[in-house]
Image (tube, helix red, strand yellow):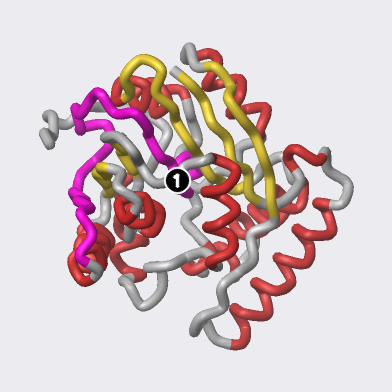
Amino acid sequence: MKIMKKVKYTGQDSSAENATFDAAGMERGLEPLQEDDYEYFFKVTGLLRKADKKIRVLEVGCGSGPFGRRLAENGYEVTGIDLSKVLVKAANDAAKNKKIKYNAISGDVFEYNGAGFDIVLCAGFLHHFTELGPIILKMKSFLKKGGYTVLIEPNGSNPAVRITEFIRKNMWPFNKMVNLGTLNETSHTAEKYISEFKGAGFKEAGISGFVKKPKFDDYGPVMNLLLRMKYIFHVMASFFMPQEIKGNVIVMRFKK
């Protein structure tokens, strides 16, 4: 795994992102989804089948590696990369404790020069970029011909997702609550993803939406109440959406 010299790019405030996730630590986050949400994601993408051959996966913005570790358990060869040294350590520690062959490295995706991957996995990664063009082209460089980018992201096609994002970014005290996310986050629409990936030379290979259930852990009564209200709002809006993108989370596949 080689890290290239630092390059300039647009679309992400990497310093703010890194500081936020490092500060959050690992009290929460090893398993950010409910187990049946993971099961749905792997079902619609077809990923969690037992690998009968060497399949190389690059998990960009891997965080604590919950998606990549599950793939590694099923025989995939997985490399994770993330800005946060705290989260990368947690990912490697969790893999070691479970005796899983999963390797995460700390670094900037734009400075990484790996290539020849079968799959680039983006689990809650792309919405940390206001501009998608540069990062999509970078991910394309990681893939071999015929490889796939697989993403699971907040569904910006859901109007309730956009409304709650606007409130979080622009209204006090929500814009001061780091547990709700960083201010750089942007929930892109399905149409935006399709347009940007096709513009980069990818072919659309599948789309599905679902309602992600919140995890309440130990956020406290106020934060838990806000999460419940947000969840109900997202569910209500989903009733009026097209079936293929219904929900507050979108899953998409694009082929190089």
**Which residue: 38% across, 56% down?**
70
198 lies above or below 242: above
11 lies above or below 143: below
Q: Which residues are magenta?
A: 99-127
Q: Amino acid at mark 1?
A: Arg
In which image quadrant can residue 44 be found?
top right
**Which residue: 62% across, 80% down?**
224
Left or right of 221 on screen, residue 199 = left
The kind of secondary structure element at disc 1 is loop
Judge by depth and name the residue closer to the eye, 61 or 44. 44
In which image quadrant can residue 252 be found?
top right
Judge by depth and name the residue closer to the eye, 63 or 21. 63
Is 84 colored magenta in this rendering? no
Number of other residues with Cα within 10 Å of mark 1, as a class: few under 14, some 14 to 19, many 20 or more:
few
Q: Quadrant of the C terminus?
A: top left
In which image quadrant can residue 14 be found?
top left
152 lies above or below 141: below
Left or right of 147 on screen, residue 42 = right
Expressed as whole percent of the image width and height from the top left, the position of residue 212 reads 64, 59
Q: Which residue is mark 1?
A: 49
Judge by depth and name the residue closer to the eye, 18 or 43. 43
**Which residue: 40% across, 53% down?**
67
Expressed as whole percent of the image width and height from the top left, the position of residue 156 reads 67, 42
Residue furthest to the bottom = 221
Q: Quadrant of the N terminus?
A: top left
Judge by depth and name the residue closer to the eye, 190 or 172. 190
**Which residue: 71% across, 66% down?**
230
Is 120 colored magenta in this rendering? yes
